[in-house]
Image: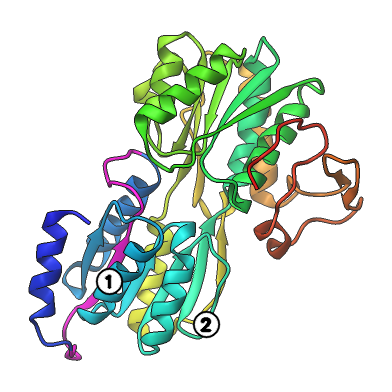
């Protein structure tokens, strides 16, 4: 936790904990990275700012950045609850258990956890359906990968990352059945030096396109330096690699935060498992490279529209895993619950992941 926010909490702890009816709704946000990562935490904070602009003096927001997953997260979430925040958003998978524990201690407050699966009357979950954008990424990557190799920088081997690797591969395979995806795990969400090293390792292994599940623009910058392609994570990263940039899979959290804060203020909020994707404009495909042909652009736009309308779902059967075992029969589509627990690679991926 930064010194600035430690001092804010110290001051807040000295204030009365009750909230008058005409006081603004106090809303807290807990970020795993810095708001200047230009990725995941940056876009959550852009959503917070949009909510402030929407509600004005009716709300008061606090954010805490660079919160480590685990004990630090639990202390931070509890401090927000103790200092009069009635609505708290926690924005990383590793915040799940700490959020659930604090929510149980404060049943009169509302908690929302991003990317998790634990629920209670006062605890809901939300996430962006990034696999939709990743499928589009795979299609675009296969169009430009002359080597036939795509590189993927994995953060942690959690279901969200596993299913997104699968989605990239399936999208790419629809263009080039012989495409290969190679994965380097960095065990961090944000570490520019480590991310750049991973990107260079993948390019040394022959990857023409770098896809990242980490939050800094370092991989895009590395791709730009070496004349390769890169895909932006969470925000539009085109400015960090004007020539390298293939597209960005953008998370726009503003609609969700505005809607949810409004529901809490009105007393209509109910716990749910929210998945927002292309159809909701929570997931957006930004700045597709003008280096692609008009035919390639048209093909990508057609896929985006088919996902938007529900005509196409990336995880529809038949789908088998790496061992050839049928996991999703023909004519069926994986449920959100099944996707939330995905711990297997689709057939054709030769990479492995840490257990």
The chief SS type of the magenta part is loop
Image coordinates of residue 165 in percent, x first then y, are 65, 38
Q: Does the magenta stretch include residue 162?
A: no
Horizontal placement of 210 versus 88: left or right?
right
Residue 300 seen in the current view:
no
Q: Name the residue under label 2.
A: 120
Q: Mark 1 points at which residue?
A: 27
Q: Compared with residue 165, is residue 219 higher up or lower down, i.e. above or below? A: above
Q: Where does the magenta region start and end?
A: 18-38
91, 60: nearer the viewer: 91
Classify mark 2: helix, strand or loop: loop
> Which label's residue is closer to the chain start, 1 or 2?
1
Image coordinates of residue 355 in percent, x first then y, are 65, 48
Determine the residue positioned at 28% across, 46% down. Answer: 34
25, 101: nearer the viewer: 101
Image coordinates of residue 139 in percent, x first then y, are 68, 28
Image quadrant assignment for residue 299: top right
């Amino acid at each position: 936790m930064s010194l600035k926010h430690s001092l804010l909490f110290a001051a807040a702890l000295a204030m009365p904990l009750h909230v008058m009816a005409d006081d603004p709704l106090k809303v807290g946000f807990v970020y795993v990275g810095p708001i200047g990562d230009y990725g995941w935490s940056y876009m959550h904070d852009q959503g917070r700012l949009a909510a402030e602009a929407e509600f004005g003096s009716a709300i008061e927001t606090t954010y805490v950045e660079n919160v480590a997953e685990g004990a630090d997260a639990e202390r931070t979430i509890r401090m927000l609850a103790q200092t009069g925040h009635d609505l708290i958003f926690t924005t990383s998978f590793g915040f799940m258990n700490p959020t659930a524990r604090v929510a149980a201690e404060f049943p009169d407050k509302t908690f929302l956890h991003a990317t998790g699966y634990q629920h209670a009357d006062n605890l809901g979950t939300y996430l962006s359906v990034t696999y939709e954008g990743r499928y589009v990424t795979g299609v675009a990557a296969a169009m430009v990968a002359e080597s036939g190799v795509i590189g993927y920088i994995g953060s942690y081997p959690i279901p969200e990352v596993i299913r997104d690797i699968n989605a990239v591969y399936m999208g790419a395979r629809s263009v080039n059945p012989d495409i290969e995806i190679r994965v380097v795990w960095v065990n961090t969400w944000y570490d520019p030096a480590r991310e750049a090293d991973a990107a260079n390792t993948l390019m040394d292994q022959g990857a023409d396109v770098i896809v990242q599940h980490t939050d800094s623009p370092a991989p895009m910058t590395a791709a730009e330096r070496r004349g390769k392609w890169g895909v932006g994570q969470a925000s539009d990263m085109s400015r960090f690699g004007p020539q390298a940039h293939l597209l960005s899979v953008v998370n726009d959290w503003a609609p969700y935060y505005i809607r949810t804060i409004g529901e809490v203020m009105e007393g209509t909020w109910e716990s749910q498992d929210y998945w927002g994707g292309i159809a909701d404009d929570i997931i957006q495909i930004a700045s597709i490279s003008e280096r692609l042909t008009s035919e390639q652009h048209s093909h990508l736009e057609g896929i985006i529209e088919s996902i938007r309308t529900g005509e196409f779902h990336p995880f529809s059967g038949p789908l088998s895993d790496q061992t050839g075992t049928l996991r999703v029969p023909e004519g069926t589509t994986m449920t959100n619950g099944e996707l939330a627990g995905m711990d297997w690679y689709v057939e054709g991926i030769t990479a492995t992941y840490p257990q």
